[in-house]
Image: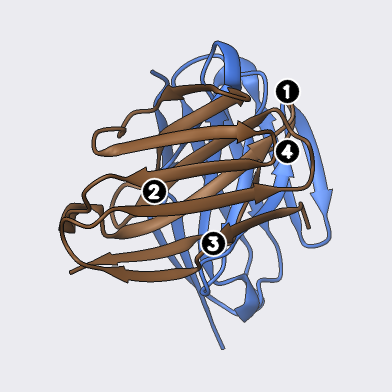
Chain colours: A brown, B blue
Amino acid sequence: DAGITQSPRHKVTETGTPVTLRCHQTENHRYMYWYRQDPGHGLRLIHYSYGVKDTDKGEVSDGYSVSRSKTEDFLLTLESATSSQTSVYFCAIRDGGAEAFFGQGTRLTVV
Amino acid sequence: GIQVEQSPPDLILQEGANSTLRCNFSDSVNNLQWFHQNPWGQLINLFYIPSGTKQNGRLSATTVATERYSLLYISSSQTTDSGVYFCAVPNTGTASKLTFGTGTRLQVTL
């Protein structure tokens, strides 16, 4: 298995609170991605990173921010969680144009 | 951006049957991946297949990049094959962001 770990695996939070999800890799891959998975939509890209401190928006970035201060860690922050952000979040890594690997996912519920 | 369509959306098979899942994409790509999402939600890499055919046990995949489609074949299906199958292709530009199809949900029954 690719060395990629997401934490926490499950979280329930209240509307309006900040939440940070962590993705940690041991592969030293350059690219890291955050996706969300919702019924009827498949997986959609939130943000991605192409190096330390180099990040960019995906197709569903509103309400999310990211940071990558080290190669191995990519953080996804919901500044003020809303019910529409209830979802399963996946982190992925890849090296150049090669195969992408996904973490085990984080199930987030905003109540 | 690139569009990815998968068919059929749902499929029910009896154990031992064969099936073909299709992935169409709207633009030229230089690679394509197939994933299996098991009932526990884990995304498992099946194939990384820019073109041609690859086989892994009872599963094989063929990508015809010039015609913008890929096929995933499952032979002698087993109940453990149940889940959702996704194909994903990279957008052009840096970072090769993957765009996913909406998946084929497969249920294999006894």
| Mark 2 vs 1, N-terminal side | 2
**Numbered disc 4: secondary structure:** strand
Tag 3 subunit: A
Which numbered disc flags the more N-terminal residue, 3 or 2? 3
Q: Alpha-carbon distance for marks 3 and 2? A: 15 Å
Residue type marked 2: Arg
Looking at the image, the residue that sits furthest to the bottom is: B110
Question: Badge 3, how many Cα within 10 Å: few under 14, some, many 20+?
Answer: some
Up the image or down, A25 lies above or below A46; here it is below
Q: Residue at x 74, y 33 (%)?
A: A29
Q: CA distance from mark 2 to mark 4?
A: 22 Å
- Front residue of A86/B79: it is A86
Chain bearing tag 1 is: A
Element carrying mark 3:
strand
Measured along the vertical axis of the image, is residue A79 above or below residue A58?
A: below
Q: Are marks 4 and 3 in contact (CB under 8 Å)?
A: no
Residue designated by label 4: B48
Which chain letter goes with mark 4? B
